[in-house]
Image (spheres, helix red, strand yellow):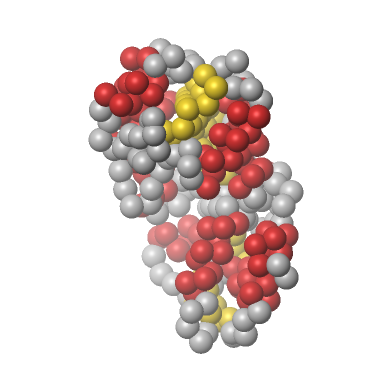
Amino acid sequence: MTTILVTGGTGTLGRLVTERLRADGHEVRVLSRHTQPYAVDLRAGGLGLDAALDGVETVVHCASSPRGGDEQAADHLIAAARRAGVGHLVYISIVGVDRVPFGYYRSKLAVERRIEESGLGWTVLRATQFHDLVVTLLQGLAKPPVVLVPAGVSDQPVEVAEVADRLAELARAAPAGRVPDMGGPEVRTFDSLARAYLRATGRRRPVANLPLFGKTYRAFRAGGHLTPEQAVGKGTFEEYLARRFGR
C-alpha cells in the first residue's frame, strides 16, 4: 500500500483523513508541530521535514492557519517533496479564494498557485465552510443580547467527514489537477443559520441583520464563496447541530 503523509493530521479535517486512509490499509504519517515522530513546524522547515517525507508517495496537505504563514509553509513542503520524489500532492482549499478579496483566501489562492507550478503531480479540492466553523462564529455572535449577522450574506456549510472522504478518495487516485468544488447541501441565509443555532442551544436572542461595507463584504453578499451547482454534501446544518448539542 501507498505511504502517505498528512500535514495537519491532528486537526479537524486531517485527523479524519488519516483515519480513512489507515482504514484502507495505507501507511500514514501524521505531520504536525507537536506530534512525534514527525513534529515539524512547516513554516520553519528543517531536516525533520525531509525525514517525514522519506519514502512518501503522496502528501495530503491539510495544515493551514488564518493567522498567516501558509505560503511559507507551502514553499518548504514543496521543496522537500521535490527532494523526496513525491508523486502526488493533494491540497484542500476554499471555495471562492479567487473571488473574495479576504486575506486568508488570498493566501490559500497563493498556495494553490505554488502547487500548480511546483512540477509535482497535484490535486486541488475547494470546499465550502465546515459546520463547526460556522458554529464557532455563531458562538461569538450570540454572546451579546442581540445576535448581529451580516445582512444579505448566505453560507453553504458542509460536513467535514464528507470532505475527508473525498480527500482520501483523491489521495488514493492519480493526480487530477483542479477537481470540482465541494459544497454543502443547502445555501442558507446567515440569519437562518443563527436561528437554527439558537434553537439547538436553547438560547433566546433576537437576530438582526447588520449591513457592512467594503469589497470583501460585497463579494460575500454576491455569493463568491458559494457553489450551489456543486451542492454535493449530504449532511445538513440541523443534523450537525443535533449531534453536537443533543436537541
Residue ID at (70%, 60%)? 243
Relative height, residue 152 to residue 71 (above, below): below
Q: Position of residue 61 (x, y in %)?
A: 46, 33
Camera-nearest residue between 144 and 96: 144
Camera-nearest residue between 237 and 39: 39
Quarter of the figure with residue 109: top left
Residue 113 seen by the camera: no
Q: The N terminus is located in which quarter?
A: top right
Q: Is residue 60 left or right of residue 226?
A: left
Residue ID at (63%, 71%)? 197
Q: Position of residue 21 (x, y in %)?
A: 61, 29
Q: The C terminus is located in which quarter?
A: bottom right
Camera-nearest residue between 150 and 68: 68
Q: Is residue 225 left or right of residue 98?
A: right
Camera-nearest residue between 209 and 199: 199
Residue ID at (59%, 68%)? 190
Relative height, residue 51 to residue 124 (above, below): above
Quarter of the figure with residue 242: bottom right
Q: Is residue 28 left or right of residue 200?
A: left
Relative height, residue 93 to residue 77 (above, below): below
Residue ID at (38%, 51%)? 66
Q: Is residue 47 left or right of residue 13?
A: left
Q: Position of residue 186 (x, y in %)?
A: 70, 56
Question: How many numbered badges does the structure rendering display?
Answer: 0
Q: Position of residue 222 (x, y in %)?
A: 54, 59
Residue 149 seen by the camera: yes
